[in-house]
Image: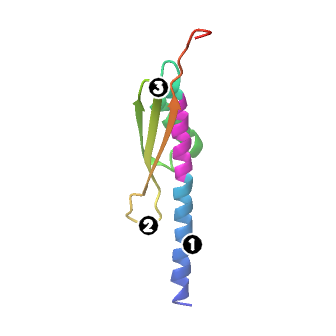
Amino acid sequence: MAILFPVVLLLVFGVIQGALWFHARHIALGAAQEAARAASAQDGTGAGQRAHQFVRDLTGGTLIRSLDVDVTATPETVTVTVTGRAPSLLPGSSGVIVEQSATAPIEQFTEAGS
């Protein structure tokens, strides 16, 4: 029992750490998609604020720390990359890096029939 219990405990903590990382990736992807939608609009402002607000509303700002939003635009598309750190169960660890991107076409008004 003395040999088996630490192994079982390690497996349990590994599964919990994997679930935290997996959930943080989904939150980061949702934030990137939300920011890409905001950036692809006619005025294209507020993408970073939308991503931060999305994470704050969904998790209270505790699941992804050190959130960084990078917006890259071309004349046709906009790409938003969200990077942050998921919490770690290991003491002294700064967390697991999470990075997700989303791309959206830039909205443009055209004349009818063109």
SS class of the residue under badge 1? helix
| Label 1 or label 3, whichever comes before in sequence order | 1
Residue that badge 2 annotates = 90
Position of the C terminus, as image quadrant, is top right
Residue range of the region highlighted in magenta in the rendering: 24-37
In the visual, does 92 lie left or right of 30? Answer: left
The mark total stands at 3
Residue farthest toward the front in the current orientation of the protein: 114
Residue 56 is one of the magenta-drawn residues: no
Residue 31 is one of the magenta-drawn residues: yes
Instruction: Quote the CA–CA distance across marks 1 and 2.
Output: 13 Å
Kind of residue at badge 1: Val
Badge 1, how many Cα within 10 Å: few under 14, some, many 20+?
Answer: few
The residue sitting at 55% across, 34% down in the picture is: 34
The residue sitting at 46% across, 61% down in the picture is: 88
* Whether residue 52 is situated above or below residue 111 in the rendered picture: below
Instruction: Quote the CA–CA distance across marks 3 and 2.
Output: 43 Å
Q: Is residue 76 visible?
A: yes
Numbered label attached to residue 103? none
Q: Nearer the viewer, residue 17 or 92?
A: 17
| Label 3 or label 2, whichever comes before in sequence order | 3
Q: Position of residue 39 (x, y in %)?
A: 49, 27
The residue sitting at 62% across, 10% down in the picture is: 113
SS class of the residue under badge 2? loop
Residue that badge 3 annotates = 76
Residue farthest toward the right in the current orientation of the protein: 113
Residue that badge 1 annotates = 12
Mark 3 vs mark 2, foreground winner is: 3
Instruction: Quote the CA–CA distance across marks 1 and 3.
Output: 46 Å
Kind of residue at badge 3: Glu
The residue sitting at 42% across, 33% down in the picture is: 71
